[in-house]
Image (tube, grey):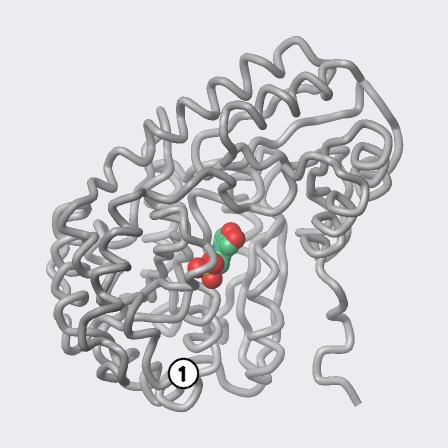
Amino acid sequence: MSKLPNVGTTIFTTMSKLANDTGAINLSQGFPNFPVDSKLVEILRQKANENVHQYMPMTGFPELMIKIRGLVESSYGRKVNTSKELLVAAGATQAIFTTILALVDKGEEVIVLDPSYDCYEPAIILAGGKSTRISLNEEFLPDWDLINSTVTNKTRMLIINSPHNPSGRVWKNEDIKQLELLMERYPQLLLLSDEVYEYISFEQKHISIHSIPSLRERSIIVSSFGKTFHITGWKMGCLVAPENLMIEINKVHQFNVFSVNSVAQATLSTYLEHVNVQELGSFYQTKRDLFRKLMSKSKFQLLPCEGTYFQTVDYSAISKMNDVEFCKQLTTDHGVAAIPVSVFNDSGKDQNIIRFCFAKDDETIIKATDLLCKI
Ligand SMILES: Cc1ncc(COP(=O)(O)O)c(C=O)c1O
């Protein structure tokens, strides 16, 4: 018997394979196609010659943890206790999985807001928990009436993600206020805040849970170096949580990973002295603006993009096909791969919206938009 009977090949694998097989431009999966910072490569080369090849301490390389503390403090004004509140993880996915396994007990409810990233629910199921998936509103922002009527005094955890994959929306001040009221009403409720795109927001700035004292005391906040430094293949990230939760998270981490890749940790520790993460937003804003400008001549309707490196579009002026079929046709007949947004919904709700990833070099963006404008 399968423990995850509903899990099959993900749409990301399917679309990337179809793009490869047909030679289409792959704007489906969320990964950059441009070279990484040469400084990072230079540091990696240096570190490979140093004595950094054995197990690191379980919770992380102390020097890297100090750098992360500095980053969180300069970004959000929060002083993290590195020995009690910080864990270096093998990517955000592992941080999320370990958190859920450690903190969600059999039968406990976890609320997930759809469309949602695909790694939350399998972790909840494997923990023996019950995932309750409810929809964001039509504009992909939280529907507070629905959230307030779904949370009960038995709900263990709420998972949020802003800047949001797949929609590219960013939560507003009002959403954070509503979240504070909710958390105040339900003292048993924990918040898992997936902030992997924290440094990729544009006009509407990201509000981190790190910067909200009343929330961070009951929150697990997840970051991804893969997203922040264009190194998704390194699978490096971290999480911050209050000590009482971290004790339990570390118990799982200890046997799930024990300690994270030593060379990567040593490299990132030195790299953090050389990089300014605050420049990431404008770096991607230039790409977003180019993508949107070139797409404005197309029949696709561009939806708001406030953060992440994803642009969603409504294609109902082009086709009435469902979004999965439309994405397949787009790849095979028009040479550009995208991701259908319905696959992020438990209900499969299809709004004729698809997601393009614009974390690509200008040449790829120009070629892809050229093809899309011909439709
Ligand atoms: C919303 C969200 N959370 C988590 C992750 C996983 O990040 P990582 O590659 O660091 O595991 C992704 C990756 O696409 C994501 O989009």
Closer to us: 87 or 109: 87
Q: Is residue 30 above or below residue 302?
A: below
**Residue shown at 60%/82% (left/top)?**
126
- The amino acid at mark 1 is Val
Q: Residue 216 in the image: state x and y as whole percent.
A: 25, 61
**Residue shown at 59%/40% (left/top)?**
137
Which residue lies under the disc numbered 1? 257
Q: Is residue 87 left or right of residue 129?
A: left
Closer to us: 164 or 45: 45
**Residue shown at 40%/54% (left/top)?**
226
**Residue shown at 53%/26% (left/top)?**
304
Q: Residue 299 in the image: state x and y as whole percent.
A: 74, 14
Q: Is residue 179 above or below residue 253?
A: above
Q: Residue 347 in the image: state x and y as whole percent.
A: 75, 54
Can you see residue 20?
Answer: yes
Q: The C terminus is located in which quarter?
A: top right
Can you see residue 159?
Answer: no
Secondary element at image label 1: loop
Closer to us: 341 or 110: 341
Q: Is residue 261 left or right of residue 274?
A: right
Query: Can you name the residue that lies furthest to the front here?
Result: 49
Q: Residues within 10 Å of mark 1 (few under 14, many from 20)?
A: some
Q: Residue 12 in the image: state x and y as whole percent.
A: 67, 53
